[in-house]
Amino acid sequence: MKPRLSARVRDLRRTLIREIFESAPPEALNLGLGQPDLDPPDALREALAGAAKDGPSGYGPTAGDRELRRLVAEEYGGFAPGFEHVVVTVGCQQATFVVLGCLLDPGDEVLVPDPGFPGAERAARAWGAVPRPYPLRPENGFHVDPDEVLRMVGPRTRAVVVISPSNPTGTVEPSGTLERLREGAHRAGFVLVLDDTYRNLHWLGEGPAPGPPSEPDPLVVVCGGLSKSAALTGWRVGWAITPDPDLVAKVVALQQTVLTCAATPIQRAARAAFSSAGREGMARIRDRFRRRRDLVEDLLGDVAPRAPLEGAFYAFVDVSRQGGGRAFARRLLEEDGIVVVPGEAFGETAPGWVRIGYAQEDVALARALGTIRERLSAPG
């Protein structure tokens, strides 16, 4: 006899992203997983060693280390009135999971981007809600059309999720788009959930990508973290920020049910990301990815249609002439030992596209991009 599985998990599977990553041979060059190849800044590694040695190592507050929360709040200016409005989570994806768990009842709807990282969609399904994809169209540069999104809002829409800079497309939403959606939230009563985990990997200007407003807004929630900007994917340092004290309280209560608290030594070490040495280290990481972004532009710029390279560390490329995303990814892996992710891993609207990550060592990346260019230049 086998255990009876709940309805909410019967159809739950690994994402195609993880399936491809975990099935690739170890010698393959992986341009598929969204993980920096760089080491974290020395300041953070030294801080972690010190935190592990000196303690404390017991439970911390469920909402997180107070000093880390204060530092995160300061990063978002006037949007977060103080540390009380920040909850430290185990990565951005867990932040999204608990935030949506506090907003959605079974049968409620949440609008999610397509193509888009599937974390919010999977969280919605796990909570018994209905994810409704809104399209990011190639003819619009894969940017959000706020009017189209707001026309999709219905009586059971409880949240609209925006990922910017985007995974998988690498696009960045302008502040005007985010403001239009925020205005729509106040008219219709939904919550605008901003996933800005790539906010510091922003190529359209200096400083972070456009994000939440500069004043508190109870209908805006930010989910973010240090995984990408500080190359800390395995540390799992994330956060949820909301100016609404009642929502904060429920996020903390639900987090206690899920994990009690994030790891105490890691939280204490993560403070170093906001020190002068930590910021210098993250600036070097950003500069490295900016140079790689330019390399992608040089090698793939004219060979195939693609999304604009505005942020994150992804190129989203049209391979429909080569048989579509899945066929191209399979051929690239089997014949060239290079891993990319087909567009169908991110929704239903881009099966003819692939996501190419440029989070790899420079020489190997240039060689892989050269091979991809040859593939894209070949007759279809």
Image (spheres, grey):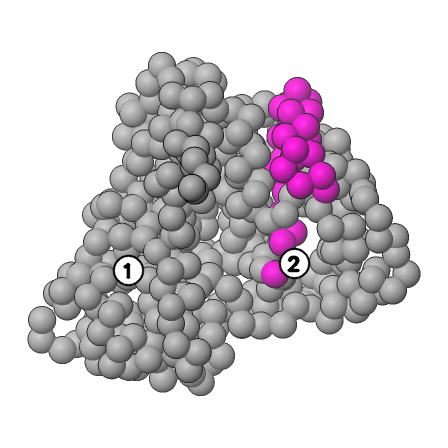
Is residue 260 placed above or below 364 in the rendered structure? above
x 50%, y 42%: residue: 195
Please say whether residue 262 is one of the residues in the magenta stretch: no
Crowding around mark 2 (Cα neighbors within 10 Å: few <14, some 14 to 19, many 20+) is: some
**Amino acid on which disc 2 is placed:** Trp
SS of the residue at dot 1? strand
**Amino acid on which disc 1 is placed:** Pro
Q: Which of the 4 image quarters holds residue 328?
A: bottom left
Crowding around mark 1 (Cα neighbors within 10 Å: few <14, some 14 to 19, many 20+) is: many
Q: Which residues are magenta?
A: 234-261
x%, y% of residue 262?
A: 71, 46
Q: Kindly identify which residue carries mark 1.
A: 342
Residue 157 appears in the figure: no
Residue 367 appears in the figure: yes
Label 1 or label 2, whichever comes before in sequence order: 2
Q: Which of the 4 image quarters holds residue 378?
A: bottom left
